[in-house]
Amino acid sequence: CEMSLSPSQSRTVTELDHVRISNLLRRQPAPGGAASATQVLLDNADLVPSQDIAPDVVTMYTRVRVADPQTGVQRELTVCYPPDADVSTGFVSVLSPVGAALLGVSEGATTHWTTPDGHSDSAQVQEVLFQPEASGEFTK
């Protein structure tokens, strides 16, 4: 799974998320190379303390409204750890292509990923609806 990041699309990840996701990747390599996309993200992200993350950046357990740039169809997604993933409720694993593509991007950004069946997909982050850090939750 290739994740195309344009050079202008920097990612910001909290130090806590970085540590937890790195540990997860060591314990649970994802099938089909999805973990490598997540690893690339972690390797290239700007790290900040949880208290310093901007409130419009997607962190773990951030709920966002995204829109398909082609169709305009909107949906709400929450980036989560694999045990909490449930596509029917919009909870997407950080190890999935879409979860890895969303982590660390800011409101207004369009992010791109390759689906497990090889298709390119993208979404624009329309609004950060909930971010744990902005609510004072630094331990989730």
Image (tube, rainbow, N blue to C red):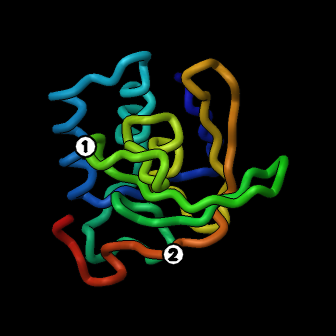
Task: Decide if residue 34 is on the left or right side of residue 136.
Answer: right
Determine whether 89 is above or below 139 in the image.
above
Determine whether 19 is above or below 138 in the image.
above
User: Quadrant location of residue 23?
Assistant: top left
Question: In the image, what residue occupies the spot 79% across and 51% down?
Answer: 69
Q: Could you tell me the amino acid type at mark 1? A: Pro
Question: Whole-percent x and y of residue 118?
Answer: 64, 19
Q: Residue furthest bottom?
A: 135
Q: Nearer the viewer, residue 127 or 92?
A: 92
Question: In the image, what residue occupies the spot 71% across and 58% down?
Answer: 67
Quadrant in the picture for the C terminus: bottom left
Q: Nearer the viewer, residue 15 or 34?
A: 34
Q: Which residue is mark 1?
A: 83
Task: Decide if residue 93 is on the left or right side of residue 105.
Answer: left
Q: Residue furthest front?
A: 88
Q: Which residue is mark 2?
A: 129
Q: Could you tell me the amino acid type at mark 2? A: Leu
Which comes sooner in the sequence, label 1 or label 2? 1
Question: Whole-percent x and y of residue 112?
Answer: 64, 40
Question: Whole-percent x and y of residue 15?
Answer: 24, 57
Q: Indicate the secondary structure of the residue bearing disc 2.
A: strand
Q: Which mark is residue 119?
A: none
Question: In the image, what residue occupies the spot 31% across and 64% down?
Answer: 48
Mark 1 vs mark 2: in front: 1
